Amino acid sequence: MTRTPFLQPLMRAALAALSLAATTAGAQATPAPATKATPAPAAKATPAEAKQFAAKLNTDLKQLWTRQATAEWIKSTYITDDTERNAASINEEVMAYVNGAIKESRRFDGLKLDADTARMLHLLRVSQTLPAPANATQRAELATTAAKLEGLYGKGKYCGKDGKGKCRDLEELSDVMAESRNADELLDAWQGWHSISRPMRPLYSQLVTLSNAGAKDIGFSDLGTLWRSSYDMQPAEFEQEAQRLWGQVKPMYDELHCYVRGRLAKQYGEAKVPAGKPIPAHLLGNMWAQEWNNIYPLVEPFPGQANLDVGATLVKQGYDSQKMVKLGEKFFTSLGLKPLPQSFWERSQFTKPKDRDVVCHASAWDVTYDNDLRIKMCIKPTEEDLVTIHHELGHNYYYTYYYKLPVLFQAGANDGFHEAIGDALTLSITPGYLQQAGLLSAVEKNDKNVINLQLKDALEKVAFLPFGLLVDQWRWDVFSGKVKPADYNKSWWELRQKYQGVAAPVARTEQDFDPGAKYHVPANVPYTRYFLARILQFQFHKALCEAAGIKGPLNECSIYGNKAAGQRLQAMLELGASKPWPEALAAMTGGKQMDATPMLEYFAPLRRWLQEQNKGQKCGW
């Protein structure tokens, strides 16, 4: 077996330890000299050594993370026991190396380092979302457990209540959730998918124990504390910041919730959707009730106005997956940004293969950390997928503008930034942009059309906010031990009700593991980034519209074709994670604090309308 370069530092350290042990053992067998020599004091670490360490670290990590990303790409696009085992093995190597590197980096604590070196060492320390325990057996167990959890999700299928019906995967069940208006069909699809996560429960408990051990080995009290430490502020301060932002947007969410519940009561009856109570989770058009845009036809304010859904047009005009992605790329190049590399078109997964299991959850990649850009999707000719393509390309364009930085800087200023870039540009997918793209005929500008469009947007962007916050609220409590394994499901639904005003449609027990029915939980992907992205995207959008010199209502602004906006965007993308996020935010917006005010400004017309509609209604839950 060939020894890989990135393991050499650990091997040298192990050999040094063995050498020291042998020397000590030998000394015990030899008579002590008459005069005992005073041992030389250990050499103090220096800033120059820290800089050399960081440089070597970037070289090693680029090789190691490339191997890891390659294995993960293969596992996600070809799910088998072999590809899972291969990914687990490489993930174990990554865990071992990073864990050792973090421990070695602690000898530079307290030194006055140059800004780049200090930031690299900080980013190293918070780089692992799944830190490895020092114990080799536990480390292998963690890697295997993590691979099994994601595999269970990717292979999940529901074959009817008796297990003898037609087997349907998440994609097929999600189609039912999006399209059916039959409450029984919706309930069956909801229960079916949530049944696939029950076997995950003991594995997840194991993951928590092992990953917490890894977090403690590198100086954090638990995994949640490690995650919150990646935001350039103290973990407790970050929790307060997230709650502050939620406080800004909660009144708007409550107004939307009240209106939607009233309309659903007209569709399904007040017995099923009573006023003043949480909304049953299976009636909101999405498997997790996280976004509600699929029920737009049920809650449309002014039926008969212009149809703003371009799905039918995509089909009529023969848009296949690549043509849809080409349209997304054209948006970015219209801003003066460079085209995607040819390898992107050759290596991406655009559609669902017919011959194997794959993870269809959309994601963007730079597999070699060297502009090897790809997306992984199972694209259909729908408006939702067109928007998702723009979002995923936002990740790719972040990658392509920072890939020449040291690999530790190849990340968003914080993880919310990465999600917000593509989302911000989707705000420019206005009727005007869709008309320019030939996907929408001219739409008369009137108040009714504005409210229709804003409600459609709010059903995705505003409805998502509490879910985006609560997923990690639940995990932080699980990681800290505040929520015990015996209360996993109970705690999950308490948070769903508290933040979302959403309830399980049927009784749940601790035999269930409903958090596991959401990809990011078994895949161990932090989720607060998506909440932050919903806030940041409107800050970015406002800043880009101002850079473009566009006046008028924020909800009508599209930066498509504006090179000045593209220059402002590129200036932030090029920073990657090389600066703390407040500095990157300032490069885009001029300010250093995350703020939901632009989001409230964007939806101001809708809020005024909702407040009128909700008069006399029993709002809240």
Image (spheres, grey):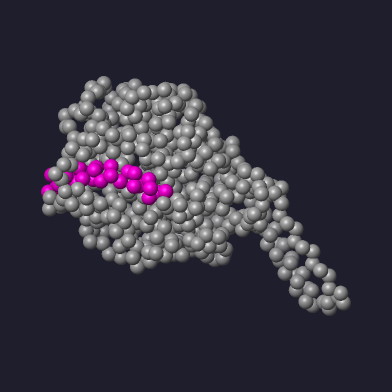
Q: State the image coordinates of residue 491 (x, y, percent, origin top left).
A: 32, 61
Tell me what residue is drawn at x 40 percent, y 49 percent. Answer: 242
The image quadrant of residue 432 is top left
Picture residue at 23% right of the left edge, 32% below the top? 451
Q: Residue at x 20, y 29 (%)?
A: 448
5 in magenta: no
Residue 224 occupies quadrant: bottom left
> Which portion, as a residue range, is magenta?
241-269
Query: Against 20, is 338 above or below?
Result: above
Main SS, magenta residues:
helix
Q: Check the image and report above or below for 206 versus 230.
A: below
Q: Could you tell me which residue is drawn at 70 percent across and 65 percent down?
A: 17
In the rendered structure, the answer to whether residue 168 lies left or right of residue 89 reads left
Extreme right residue here?
A: 34
Residue 541, image x, y percentages? 40, 32
Whether residue 277 appears in this view of the structure is yes
Q: Residue 30, how many percent across, how many down? A: 82, 77
Count of residue discs: 0
87 and 584: which is toward the camera: 584
